[in-house]
Amino acid sequence: MNIEEWRDGKKIGVVERDMQIEVFNTKNKPPVNGPLSNYCTEVGDTIDFLFTSTDENNDHMALQATSGIFAIPSCSATFTKIDSTAGFASSRFRWIPCHEAVRSQPYNVIFKSDDDNGDVNLSDIDNISIKVLGPSPTLLNAVPVGKQITLSWSDYGTPAIAGFAIYRREGATNFVPDSCTAGLPASTGFVKVGYIAGSSTTSFSDSDNGKGLQFGKEYTYRIVAVYPNGAESKASNEITSTLVSGVPVIKIVSVTATSTSNGSIYIEWRKPDKLDTIPANGPYEYIISRATGIGGSNYEQIRSIKTASLNDTTFTDVSINTQTTGYIYKIELWNDETGNRFLVGEPAYASSVYLSIAPGDRKAKLNITRNVPWINTRYDFFRFNDNTSAYDSVGTTNQLDFIDKGLENGKEYCYYIRSVGGYLSNDMPKNLVSLSESICITPVDNEQPCPPGINVNTQCDSLYNTVRWSVTDDECNADIAGFRLFYKLTTEENLSLLAEIDDRNIFSYKHFPGDIIAGCYAVSAYDSVGNESEKSVMMCIDSCNFFEIPNVFTPNGDDINEKLVAKTSGLVEKIDFRLFNRNGMELFKTENPRIEWDGTYKGKIVSPGVYFYQCDVYERRISGLELFHLSGFVHVITEVNSKLKNETTK
């Protein structure tokens, strides 16, 4: 039995395996097990089902279940006989996994039914996998303290775990773990930032390994329970927090006018309270500074507000460019007493909400940047309505990216966003609303279509390959105008254009490459304005292996089957064929792929009998010229009345 190994459409190896099959002549039919399902389950959930089997011959059956889960001391599974009659048997499988059963790999459970037949006993074997996951921990809070954030969570409720792993990323996500996902996949963007041992631990302080977290960043956390064997539980819920800076707590930084030169931004902060008035008994001064860009650092002072009561807590920054940039503001509180002037606490920082936009095919791609000390939990997107001359809400998200679809290419659309959020601490401002600038964009078809999927089949007898492709996404398919098919004969060559199909409804192509039907194919899609997708996965297919040497011929002069002629194709460039008699003497050799031996040795027909051959075949394949070896026997049959009567001795 030949077993071929293929990878990415290319054959990379062949191995031969022997198999021993015992054949019985019996009328007994094997039992048939009922359907089974794989499971992903949490600790404490119950798996309970009937395993059934039927027998067409009405034989009695014995049912078995084998797995390591039947030997777990804390929570072993059970397999209990329920019913056993002629032709039918059932048993109940029941398992409530415990924390000690959690591991990274699923458990395999083998179910077997054996019939009891006087002729021969037959069986049916099936298996299922059961993956056991630890339940999600519950994060309760993420409180900023100085330059670190302290997480707290509910007690996990078992001594069977080793501790907790802490994961962090910037910005919120929509990740919801499915029933089979443990831990946090790398695709979520979470990075492990800490581990704390102890099954009863319920808190962790993140200081970025002592370096301190950064002001103005939103830190999102999840945790997982870690078991002694290294397995992780399902991920916890998600909590986002940020450091709080400054004695004047900024509440609003909102664009009130959009212009390249006459724009304006409104800033509001909370009146400082709980000041220690012994060293700082006033009067006071607010100093407001501004830096260009959401993450700017080159601050320049733009306003000074002297106050005795600290009640002046608003400022509007005017005559600025709000069209093409955002700004970050710094507010400082100074004790302005003569001879006793000093900075009270730390400055407060917060930026405006800046909206950038890019055109797409019948869509607008919007992106938000901001640098604020509070958590924005919602972003509302508004689009200008030409009919009502007002902005309509077109979507809401907690993410920083949003795509407005279903637009008309070539038409201008204008947007702004509203951020809604607040500080996490109970005594800090909530329900904070800020607006971005307004910005306009004209959608244009500048996007590549989706790359198609591809498949290739070979018709060896007709010497052609059928290439088929597909696009499963309806939205992508609607954008496609046609396809380009690429081909190369060997893996060392470069793909070149084979055909262009200008019909989006055609999904196949017959390619007749000649005698050598090996090759690699890829297909791309293009739209009506010329955007071309990436090429599909390259699919390679090798030539049909076809070389056969007959095992008998009759050089007897009747013009029928007079020569030993190999069945071959144009793929075979040459051979090294050598024929021997039973004494090992070489009688014939050739490089002719067809062989065409007439049965003679030194002009005389050989004696009838069996002759041995060795043959190396050089065949053109997808990877180039490859060699494979054949050996076997040829039966030579002659008659007494053969035209060449003088025969050699074998």
Image: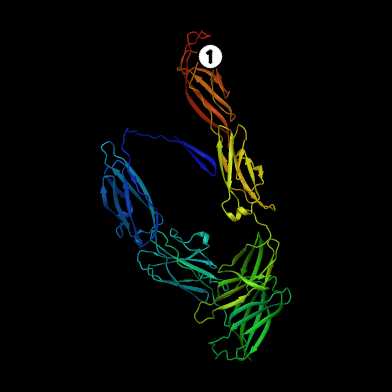
Which residue is nearer to you in this view: 38 or 538? 38
The answer to whether any part of residue 537 appears in the image is no
| Residue 392, quarter of the rendered image | bottom right
* Residue 535 percent location from the top left of the image: 62, 48
Residue linked to disc 1: 600
* Numbered disc 1: secondary structure: strand
Which residue is found at the position 33% from the left and 60% from the top?
Answer: 96
Which residue is nearer to you in this view: 318 or 406? 406
* Residue 440 percent location from the top left of the image: 69, 68
The answer to whether any part of residue 631 appears in the image is yes
Q: Is residue 125 left or right of residue 354?
A: left
Which residue is nearer to you in this view: 138 or 122? 122
Q: Is residue 585 left or right of residue 113?
A: right
* Residue 408 percent location from the top left of the image: 67, 62
Quadrant for the N terminus, please. top left
| Residue 271, quarter of the rendered image | bottom right
Which residue is found at the position 53% from the left and 74% from the top?
Answer: 147
Question: Coloring scheme of the render?
Answer: rainbow
- Sort mark 1 into few (<14), some (14-19) or many (20+) by Cα contacts within 10 Å: some
* Residue 377 percent location from the top left of the image: 54, 72
Q: How many marks?
A: 1
Which residue is nearer to you in this view: 205 or 367? 367
What is the three-letter code of the residue carrying label 1?
A: Thr
In the displayed structure, 606 sits above or below 616; it is above
In the displayed structure, 302 sits above or below 522; it is below
- Residue sticking out furthest to the right: 261
In the displayed structure, 595 sits above or below 402; it is above
In the displayed structure, 361 sits above or below 435; it is above
